Image (cartoon, grey):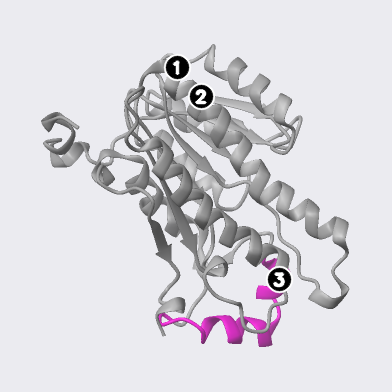
Amino acid sequence: MDSTTYNVPTKQLFTLQERTILVTGGLGGVGSPVIYSILESGGDVICLDLSPDPKDLDRFHAIASNHGAQFFYYSLNVTDEHQVSKVIDEAISKLRHPLRGVVTAAGTSGKIDAVDYPADAFRKLLDVNVMGTFLVVQAAVRVMQRQKVGGSVVLIASMSGSVANKGVNTSAYNSSKSAILQLARSLAMEWGNSPNHPPIRVNSLSPGYIYTRLSEVDTSNEATRKLWTEGNMLGRISHAEEYRAPILFLLGDGSSFMTGADLRVDGGHCAW
């Protein structure tokens, strides 16, 4: 690392100008606000999600236009290895700035008693949350290495990867997020100090409970909502927009000496 990396002016520590960031699950509760913040920070965005024909992409294009950025959308099943490679290669061919970052917000959940959990459902969740994350990051980092640029990868984990959630039977989801924590550490080791390419940092972000479409059923239940809010030190459930700044920090030069770490943003839930 040369001195230009850690002598970046303060006002540039969070800027993402002249770089492209790839975001999976970009139409979801966490991914969407993240894309807004990346575009507002000057970065171009490749958004990957399942929907083949989303109707609300104008909002992203408008923000991109207002900030001199570009936005691209591709429909993608993250568990399909060949589709992942094909779509990412196609997306890269249209870029004006190198791919310098990845945020993996694609994922699914499932609340089923462990004793009754169907094996196929358990495997499918692991396939999406773990294998899907790995395939996208693998394909993206291959591009970074070909481009000979450094970058930052942010894997969206969960506090559920570090603790068992009281009153919520989500054994498959919790296991998948624990795997993401270990995946981040392992990839950070492989890509942080290679003689063949600039360093690529890999960190994970572990959110607490969030008001999203996936949690709507639980958060609308008074008993569950009380259990969740009393389970952290701030006494409330978070909003997806509260993860924008932590993710921007991990993507940008402000976190240049941070890799293999988990940034837990959980309202103090795991600190009791």
Q: Nearer the viewer, residue 185 or 270?
A: 185
What is the spatial separation of the Cα atoms under label 2 and label 3, in whole angstroms? 33 Å
Mark 1 and 2 residues: CB-CB less than 8 Å, in contact? yes
Q: Which residues are magenta?
A: 215-234
In the figure, 86 relative to 17: above or below? above
Main SS, magenta region, reads: helix
Which numbered disc, 1 or 3, marks the residue that appears first in the sequence?
A: 1
Residue type, label 3: Thr
Q: Residues within 10 Å of mark 3 (few under 14, many from 20)?
A: some
What is the spatial separation of the Cα atoms under label 1 and label 3, in whole angstroms? 39 Å
In the drawing, does residue 223 fall left or right of residue 23? right
Among the 4 quarters of the image, the one containing residue 51: top right
Residue linked to disc 1: 146
Q: Residue at x 49, y 78 (%)?
A: 236
Image depth: mark 1 or mark 3 in front: 1
Residue linked to disc 3: 170
Residue linked to disc 2: 142
| Residue 26 visible to the viewer | no
**Secondary structure beneath label 3:** loop
| Spot occupied by residue 189 in the image (x, y as percentages of width and height) | 40, 44
Q: Nearer the viewer, residue 242 or 100?
A: 100
Whether 5 is among the magenta residues is no
Q: Residue at x 41, y 80 (%)?
A: 234
